[in-house]
Amino acid sequence: MMEWSTACTDWEQRIVARQSLIPFEPLFPDQAAEALEVFGDLRMVDATGSPLMSETVRSWVNEFVAAIFGAYDPYSGRRMISEFMLLISKKNGKSTIAAGIMLTALVLNWRTSGEFIILAPTKEIADNSYIPIRDMVKADEELSALLKVQDHLRTVTHMETGATLKVVAADSETVSGKKAIGVFIDELWVFGKRANAEAMLREATGGLASRPEGFIIWATTQSDAPPAGVFRQKLMYARKVRDGEIKDPSFLPVLYEFPKAMLDAGKHRDFSNAYVTNPNLGLSVDEPFIERGYTQAQLDGEESFRGFLAKHLNVEIGLALLSDRWAGADFWEVQASELCRTLEDLIERCEVIDIGVDGGGLDDLLGLAAVGRERATRRWLTWTHAWAHPSVLERRKAEAPRIRDFAKDGHLTLVERIGDDIKEVAQLVAQVEQAGLLDKVGLDPAGVGAILDELEALGIPREKIDGISQGWRLGGAIKTAERKLAEGTLLHGGQPMMAWCCGNAKVEPRGNSILITKQASGSAKIDPLMALFNAVTLMALNPEGQGGMENFMAGIRDPLIA
């Protein structure tokens, strides 16, 4: 029985050494050779001199094409590797590669009236793939006789088999009812921002259930914002397959991204390393353009530079930085720590904990933040969680994919009934109180009645519940938090949800103070961050250590101690 693995566990060494990211030879070499012959004879009309693909593409392209078509078993009629993901920096010829692969598939297809689709999120992106297809056909007499081109439909029809290759723009055309043999999804990162993308892509790719020779290719650059939705799901899965954490021989990831060690060392910011995620550097990617881009983006500030790195170097944005951002956001990512992944971590390590709560409207998140002072070091450790009613997903459709991601991560809870969120908040506060660590709970004074009732019902003393003044009066806590982050004495669990909230926060100067408000941040959510500021307000008062779990457990063993 044939065996192979699509994992590439040494990819970090390979990518730096400019070696192949495909760790095996084509499973069926004859099929790969036939496809490469067709692919290589296609003419790249928009390149100088209109060369053949075989004359201009680099080896990584041929290896990718060979892996796709070389996975087809002609004896069983089944494609042994049916799903592929290509993550590559902007301007590396992704759309031209899509055109060549799908045109090759149309020519080699044997199924009568078969369908092939290139699905793009917008008409402009669809045209990027369709125009090279049209030009490749027109530039070849043999293809022109074999294939009928219909510009108004963005469709190419094989005159003998009746099979079609159609380029579809998802923003204006329907994809339901398709029975495609091959689907090329272009710029998956854009689909990741759409609330209905998962259902749409399921419709577009559903035909493969009855097409054993079929395939799906997910192709994309990195997102200009923290990855979300279907893009984030596919990217995380692809990385786990590549790293050998998931064994899936039917899925081949080819991901041009920097090794973590290079990112940690800041080497992605050095132009000399641009080749790592740009295998076409010096060909379709102009070196002087990228070098100028490095310089210009750095001069324009960190926000601009991160955007440049995302698109041209495939560097994932973990935290979006706005020009009017909260100063603490600049230091947020580097303060992530394994020491405070859970509330239990804080209970184990801290001598006192303050809790902040904020939000909770029908189109809001309800945020809870716990800030604990670590024994001995006196560093502040923070943990956060959020709750949302499903109505938020309807009211804030633009943010729905991201909110679902946070729920899958376990950092946010989607509750069925309003009120369940408050009960869970009160239970977490009671957990800290029972551990003997609770100093106080800080709440936005507006609309705290229901939370007060739940807290008191669970035995939280009324004197431990404080209203925290909002607006400009919160300026001191905002400044304290950013100073602690810059000093390295405020640590957090590295939750993507909080990175998102920090990136959403917009600062308004107000007299001698600063203001971060939900109104200024618009539809973007910051409730867990506001909860953090409430907790920081209390911790900044330097509460006494509560003794913590050790004294609590001692009290259980000997009631006289309590």
Image (spheres, rainbow, N blue to C red):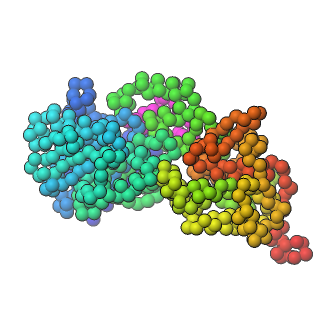
Q: Is residue 62 left or right of residue 346?
A: left
Judged left or right of residue 288, residue 78 is: left
| Vertical relation: 337 (above or below) 154 | below
How far across and down, in percent of the image, does residue 90 sit? 40, 36
* Residue 264 falls within the magenta-colored stretch: yes
* Residue lying at 13% horizontally and 47% vertically, measured from the top left: 158
Query: Observer-nearest residue: 30 or 85?
Result: 85
**332 and 453: which is toward the camera:** 453
Q: Which residues are magenta?
A: 261-279
Front position in the image: 528 or 74: 528
Q: x, y percentage for residue 452?
A: 75, 64
Relative image position of residue 233 (x, y in whole percent): 45, 54
> Image quarter for residue 429?
bottom right
> How far from the left and from the top, in percent, is residue 477?
75, 44
- Can you tell which quarter of the image residue 464 is in? bottom right
Which quadrant holds the C terminus?
bottom right
Q: Main secondary structure of the magenta part?
A: helix
- Is residue 157 part of the magenta span, yes or no? no
The quadrant of the picture occupied by the N terminus is: bottom left
